[in-house]
Amino acid sequence: MYTVYALYSPDYDKMYIGYTADLDARFRSHNELAVKGYTVKYRPWILLYTETYPTKSEAMKREKELKSHKGRDFIRTLIKSFRT
């Protein structure tokens, strides 16, 4: 099982979209363990959105969709509802 997820950094108003086979470990990496990369700069992150898929290829396809303009608009809508 694979999870597509969206993270949000309220302190910096940034989003991050990815996929993983182990969401707990990946989220911990984004918030604590990683020492370099995009997500290190904008900690702390909150888990804003998830979807699960049975195969890696399906998760990768959905991640790509969420990274598109239309997908980012969808995530921004979720962020707006989170802030209110």
Image: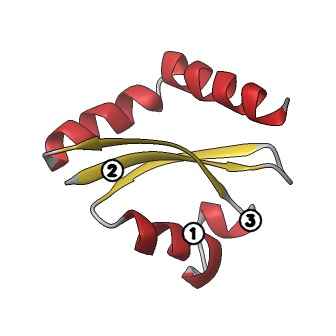
Q: Are marks 2 and 3 in contact (CB under 8 Å)?
A: no
Residue 2 location (% of width, % of height): 25, 52
The residue shown at (47%, 24%) is 68
**10 Å neighbourhood of mark 1: few (<14), some, or many (≥20)?**
many
Q: Extreme top residue here?
A: 70
Residue 5 location (% of width, % of height): 45, 47
User: Label 1 belongs to which residue?
Assistant: 30
- The image shows residue 65, relative to residue 70, as above or below, that is below
User: On the rendered image, what quadrant is the N terminus found in?
Assistant: bottom left
Residue 76 location (% of width, % of height): 67, 26
The residue shown at (14%, 45%) is 54
- The image shows residue 68, relative to residue 58, as above or below, that is above
Marks 2 and 3, how far apart at CA: 20 Å
Quarter assignment of residue 25: bottom left
- The image shows residue 48, relative to residue 66, as above or below, that is below
Marks 3 and 1, how far apart at CA: 8 Å
The kind of residue tagged 2 is Thr
| Left or right: 68 in relation to 38 | left
The kind of residue tagged 3 is Pro
The kind of residue tagged 1 is His
| Left or right: 7 in relation to 3 | right
User: Label 2 belongs to which residue?
Assistant: 3
- The image shows residue 21, relative to residue 65, as above or below, that is below
The residue shown at (75%, 35%) is 82
Disc ID at residue 44:
3
Residue 52 location (% of width, % of height): 29, 43
Q: Tag 3's secondary structure?
A: loop
| Left or right: 57 in relation to 37 | left
